[in-house]
Image (cartoon, rainbow, N blue to C red):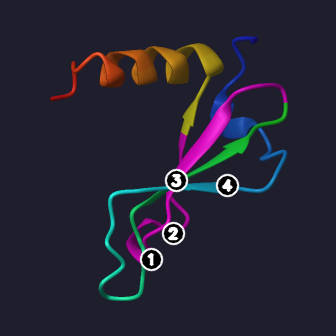
Amino acid sequence: MSNENLYEQVVAGPFKKLCGGGDNSDGTMEDCLTVAPLSGGGFALGDSKPAGAGRELRMSKVELTSFARAWLSGLAE
């Protein structure tokens, strides 16, 4: 991955929803993280809730992997 600004990269694929935790009792099933690849590497992450529309966090593969490892190890608890 180059040192390019991830926020200048174009989203290169469709956003996929990674859902979980909701019971869908209100019919919305809003507990989804959205993820799409960026051209040149990296990922755009979003929130499927209406309030999150148009807002993205951009991370390199290394940053996203580091976050995931920390989260799974209990660092975020």
Q: Could you tell me residue 16's position as x and y percent? A: 67, 55
Alpha carbon of mark 3 to alpha carbon of mark 2: how far? 8 Å
- Mark 3 or mark 4: name the one nearer the start of the chain: 4
Given this view, does label 1 or label 4 mark the residue nearer the observer? Answer: 4
Residue 45 drawn above or below residue 74? below
- Mark 1 or mark 4: name the one nearer the start of the chain: 4
Q: Amino acid at mark 1?
A: Pro
- Mark 3 or mark 2: name the one nearer the start of the chain: 3
**Among the 4 quarters of the image, the one containing residue 3:** top right
Q: Which mark is on residue 50?
A: 1
List the residue tagged with mark 4: 16
* Viewer-nearest residue: 14 or 59: 14
- Mark 4 or mark 2: name the one nearer the start of the chain: 4
Highlighted range, magenta: 40-57
Alpha carbon of mark 4 to alpha carbon of mark 2: how far? 14 Å
Residue 48 drawn above or below residue 61? below
Q: Amino acid at mark 2?
A: Ala
Q: Could you tell me residue 39's position as x and y percent? A: 84, 35
Q: Which mark is on residue 46?
A: 3
Secondary structure at badge 4 equals: strand
Tell whether label 1 touches label 2 (CB within 8 Å): yes
- In the rendered image, which quarter contains the C terminus? top left
Q: Residues within 10 Å of mark 3 (few under 14, many from 20)?
A: many
Residue 56 drawn above or below residue 8? below
- In the rendered image, which quarter contains the N terminus? top right
Tell whether label 2 touches label 3 (CB within 8 Å): no
**Among the 4 quarters of the image, the one containing residue 67:** top left
Q: Which mark is on residue 53?
A: 2
Alpha carbon of mark 1 to alpha carbon of mark 4: how far? 16 Å
